[in-house]
Image (cartoon, rainbow, N blue to C red):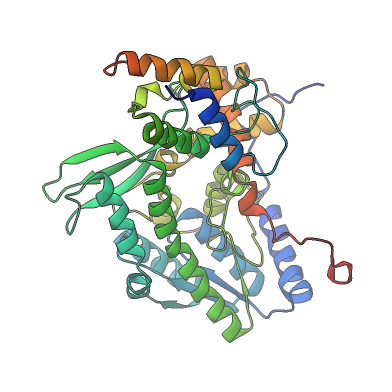
Amino acid sequence: MATIALHSGVFDLDYTLEADRIAARMIEVVGRELRRRGVVIAMSGGIDSSVCAALAVRAFGTKVYGLMLPEHDSSAFSLHRSTILAKHLGITFGVEGIGPTLEALGCYRWRDEAIRAVFPDYGAGWKNKIIIAGGKEGSFNYFKLVVQDPEGRLLESRLPVREYQQIVAATNYKQRVRKTVEYFHADRLNYAVIGTPNRLEYDQGFFVKNGDGAADLKPIAHLYKTQVYAMARHLGLPDEICNAIPTTDTYSLQQGQDEFYFALPYDKMDFALWAFNHAVPSAELAHFLALPLEQAAFIYTDIVAKRRATRYLHAAPVLMEPVTEISN
Amino acid sequence: MQDVKQAVRQFLLDNFLMGSSATIADDASFMRGHVLDSSGFMELVLFLEESFGVKVEDAELMPENLDSLENIQAYVARKRASPAAA
């Protein structure tokens, strides 16, 4: 089988045409298939939700409702940038802090209890994040907990599986509560809910099931992150949005997506996923990205492993036998 | 001494191959056989630490230590013989 060459222009698109195509499809989906009147979008100030919001405005004009849903660990920049964007787009929006709801649910309490199992002194004034480790050095992927004490000292330790799962489960409350609020407004307005994953996130399962993974339509799930940035510039979004560095904005210490989940920063990971999808040999990827051969091979293995591990996140509820009357 | 291979085999059958009639050969890779993913290996580590009293160090999270029943048996034997090193 002939392979397609990997080169720096593989993400080139006619962005005018693509924006029009996505907007037309959104109208078709929301209006005719879902029979809703507009869309709700949660805006984080990051590139993905910003581009989705701008595309939604292109499709639905004023029938777009923006939501900012900060909690105790959210960066102040998130609300700042998303407010700039909402005003830039001229949409109606609401700001609803979800911190008290998360407190009532025990989100922070469950999380901190698991952190204290590893760092017993952890408490008020401390910050935390989870980072991925291993993999690249030939070992298995595993996670480390990083905490910062009130004096600014950083400490890290491998996270045992139970504590890791409890911290992730607790923080997943954040995405799930946000989605609950989004659907409240969607029901109130008879709107549909937009999900904002880019292709990397969608393909590699970087989302919370029934949290940010839940939506009625996902307008940019087919676009590589590099293309999302290019689309943002094409749509004339404010510089603060176009230049934002991707973070998870979920943990109190700033956490890059490549620290937590992906094997490489997004711009390189995009090329890796593209190359893998187009059967480009890993040696060619290694040469293109100036990576060691073993690292490129590991990245391909990791792409497959993440697809397999996150299949459950994509899966619809499984029936014990088909109910043919309501099958699509 | 408890049979490490048999205990780990039973742990994998009970927790990762539930209800399947699969068997696990002594030299079969859990990774290549899709028995364990990365979080599965972390569960395995916890099982080894709790069952055999060994402390698995970060640098020891390698396939040559953990990715088959016989590798695990040899690894646990090395740890017990020399608790300070793998």
Residue A95 position within the rendered picture, expressed as x and y whole percent measured from the top left: 39, 76
Which quadrant would the N terminus of chain A be assigned to in this image? top right
| Left or right for A56, reference A167 | right
- Camera-nearest residue between A166 and A141: A166
In this view of the protein, which residue sits in the foreground, A167 or A98?
A167
Q: Quadrant of residue A142?
A: top left
Does residue A235 appear to the left or right of B45 in the view shown?
Answer: right
Residue at the image point whose x is 54% and y is 36% from the top: B11
Residue A90 seen in the figure: no
Name the image quarter holding residue A60.
Answer: bottom right
Where A208 falls versus A223 (above or below)?
below
Q: Is residue A229 above or below residue B60?
A: below
Is residue A234 shown left or right of residue A277? left
Residue extending farthest to the bottom is A188
Report the residue at 40% width, 58% height from top. Answer: A171
Q: Quadrant of the C terminus of chain A?
A: bottom right
User: Does A47 sit above or below residue A86?
Assistant: above
Instruction: Provide residue A120's location: percent of width, then percent of height.
Output: 20, 48
Number of numbered discs on residues: 0
Taking depth in this image into account, of A117 and A58 the one nearest to the observer is A117
**Residue drawn 65% across the image and 47% down it:** A311
Residue at the limit of the structure toward the front, as seen here: B1
Q: Is residue B6 left or right of residue B33?
A: left
The image shows residue A316 at horizontal and vertical percentages of 70, 59
Residue drawn at point x = 65 percent, y = 53 percent? A314
Q: Residue furthest left?
A: A151
Residue A85 visible in the snapshot = yes
Q: Residue B9 falls in which quadrant of the image?
A: top right
